[in-house]
Amino acid sequence: MSLSYIIRRVLGTIPLLFGISLILFAIIHFAPGGPLDVYADNPSVSKEALEQIAKAYGLDQPVHVQYVLWLKSMVIGDWGYSIRTGRPVLTDIVERLPPTLELGGLALVVSLLLAVPLGVLGAVRRGTKVDGTVTIASFIGISTPVFWLALLLQLAFSVWLGWLPSAGYQSIGNGSFLDRLSHIVLPASVLSLATIASWSRFIRAGMADVLNQDYIRTAYAKGQTSFGVIFFHALRNAMIPAVTVIAVDFGTVISGAVITETVFAWPGIGQLFMESMNGRDYPMLMGLMMMGSVGIIIANLVADLTYTALDPRIRYA
Amino acid sequence: MKLTRRATLQTFIAGSAAFATLRAFPAAAQAKGGTLRVGLTYEIDTMNVYSTGFLGDAQAAVVEGLLAPDTHAKYVPVLATEVPTVQNGGIVLSPDGKTMKITYKLRPNVKWHDGKPFTSADVKFTWEAVKDPKFIAESKDGSSQVESIETPDDLTVIVNYNTVLPTFASTLFTFGIMPKHQIEGTDINTSSYNEMPIGTGPFKVKEFKRGQYCATERFDDYWRKAPNGDKLPYLDGIVFKMIKDSNTLITQLKSGEVDLVVQTPYNQAKQVEGIAAIEIVKGQLLSWQHLDFNFKRKSLADPAVRKAIAHGINRQVLIKAQGGFPEPIKSPVVPVFDFYDPNTPDYAYDVEKAKKILDDAGYKAGSDGVREKDGEKLSYSFVIQAGRADDELAQQVIIAQLKAIGIEAKADNKTGVAFRDARYKGGYDLLYSRWITSADPVYSVFWGTGGANNGQSYSNPTLDAAFKKFEASFDPAVRKAAAAEFQKILAEDLPSIPLTTNVAVIAKSKKLKNFVPNPTNMTNFVDTSAWYMA
């Protein structure tokens, strides 16, 4: 792997992002409705007022002109203004990023800490009751609808037991570490359940595959302990297929978890996206989706680079 | 002294009691208080009432106008000392009757939240700021009709209008007065006012966390006093929590994390009824659902067809389909208003009568059961705004009921701009939708000849004359008579069938006292000063 490879990959993202932005812009403008729809039932909002708002945001221009205007300002780093709040898009996004990164980051770290041992356990004890239990649990985890699990946990821990707040990022005017921790427990649990389930499946499959290899038998023959064989010889190779999935999941953290954030009134990117979608806030939507795209592109690059770190035989020219 | 366990306990209890008594004394001076936690189903976009895309619930607790509508949608003075009328000399019409002048006497000794005095300069500044073309806002109503404003002294405002505007109270200065000293010289589109507005209201903004909550606290120098002389407001503060998911909102009511929800979705009202600490209050709303006819269709321009349809619709079924919450109406003037005329004629549900009217008018059923006359089939395109569950249900009910009298309606649902376009330009035969009005509505926009919202191509000179009388007069008696007149004409000529009016299902903690619902667009929070948590 060389520096020139990374530079080429990064340069390659420019036409990619351009294409993505064109498609996204077209899709959100073809979607029915527009930013001025919120006023549809209100007879006292005059036509003149609507025209003035449309003009202020360039909505009176043809779509292709709007796109060129958007692209021009985006290139020089101007993300535009939110139609809904009237504030710069970047300001709104920067404000929402920390809660999203905290929630998504915590959920993924928890997922990683639990998924790896569970996956390894399933593979090592293949065919036993332990493996069966882990497998069934994984399938339940993958197929549980997020909003349903969220409601159930809220009911149990907030309404019945009264241990944890049912929603929100912090108590009014509190915001201490413990207070925020008590708020993040439920959404992070909901968010990590599905990832734990899917990742542990990938790790189990990769591990099961590796454990049949000759070099594992050799390692055992040399008198290595089971622990050493599994965690020093096998796991590294078993992780390669799982890395792609895990890296891309990390990349999507930046886009926020729309459902979880909405159900838990979590003031992050996912909720901002939902609100902007409902209000057809075009500049905000473009900003959010471009940021999400960049996140996924970077995650893919990181996944590719991680392969070489895990398996030095993989080379990129 | 050796203390037995029991003695220790007794000492402890006595001590606690003494402590409690000590604490109780200062508390007695401010017996009524508490913090009210409100759950909003939307995210506050801006705290500026003139540019928000929502009703300003939180804003109403912070910002005040010169006047405000009360629980009966009648205007009462707030920052003005009285509601200007022709009788009290507050409104003076020019000799030619084409323009008017309104004089407001302002309440003395009112302070802004930062302690600065509230004066006539703030009122004048509000007009200048709102009408400024650079200010991006949808609520500029009433600003272009003002020619100039004079402020002879700190407590007198004379507003010169370039026209006669009897609905002046539902516009500009009622929404709220802006503090000149906070906004002047800044770009109002990005001003700090949009997050931390300085108002004169009972509560001041303490913290505004986007996407989370808006916390307010008691304003100690608030001008209003309770009838018994108590300092107001009673509450220590109101917190508006933004919780978009309605299931979560109900959970928060159950877990006691929220005390008040002013817009409970109809389909969740049943759940709320089961929560012991919560009671439901039904609040009137100034909105109504209607079925409109497009007069470009020859058969719909025929009063017989319109009347037959009116007899063919069973409002009770429509109401049931919407959870049983809407209430039946016969006039677009909803019953909250005192100029609603209860003697307005109505059309009872009577399928046989509907059929007979159509038979007599010569509409005969064809082979497919759909009636026709002179080659025109009574088959209509039926537009609603797509994606609104309640409207879609109502549409299905109406289609079925029309079928029973031999009229075919085909759903042609449109979204967003397409719907708006169809509604205003008449891109439909039948249209089911709703209007929401201010506390001081004008009806000529809906059915007046060439009215801005008249997409029906409906024109009736007698009705226009009645609207004109209603909308140009300041005399309550004349207005009431004119209102009865236009309601009668609307019911008899039936350009639109008023079907139902909505109620707001308000879920409130039983501890919240003195809560009074408000039906207008100034929200339930227009006067929160006397509320308290028991």
Image: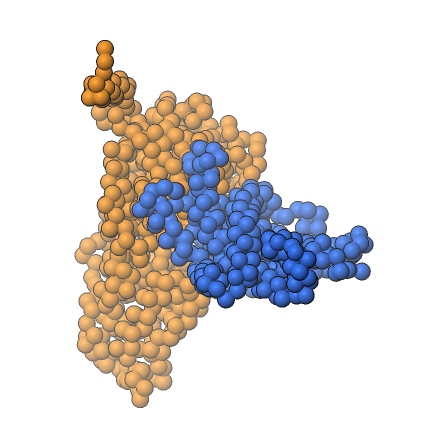
Chain colours: A blue, B orange
| A129 with respect to A291 (left or right) | left
- Image quadrant in which you'd find residue B110: top left
Residue under the image location 65 percent in, 56 percent down: A223
From what the image shows, is residue B11 above or below residue B308? above
Most distant residue in the bottom direction: B367
Question: Toward the viewer: B408 or B261?
Answer: B261
From what the image shows, is residue A6 above or below residue B143? below
Residue under the image location 39 percent in, 42 percent down: A165
| B116 with respect to B135 (left or right) | left
Residue B354 in view in this figure:
yes
Give the percent coordinates (x, y) of residue B94.
Answer: 38, 38
Give the percent coordinates (x, y) of residue B249.
Answer: 36, 48
Give the percent coordinates (x, y) of residue A119.
Answer: 54, 58
The quadrant of the rendering that contains the N terminus of chain A is bottom right
Question: Toward the viewer: B230 or B512?
Answer: B512
Residue under the image location 31 percent in, 89 percent down: B367
Residue B421 in view in this figure:
no
* Number of disc labels: 0
From what the image shows, is residue B383 above or below residue A199? below
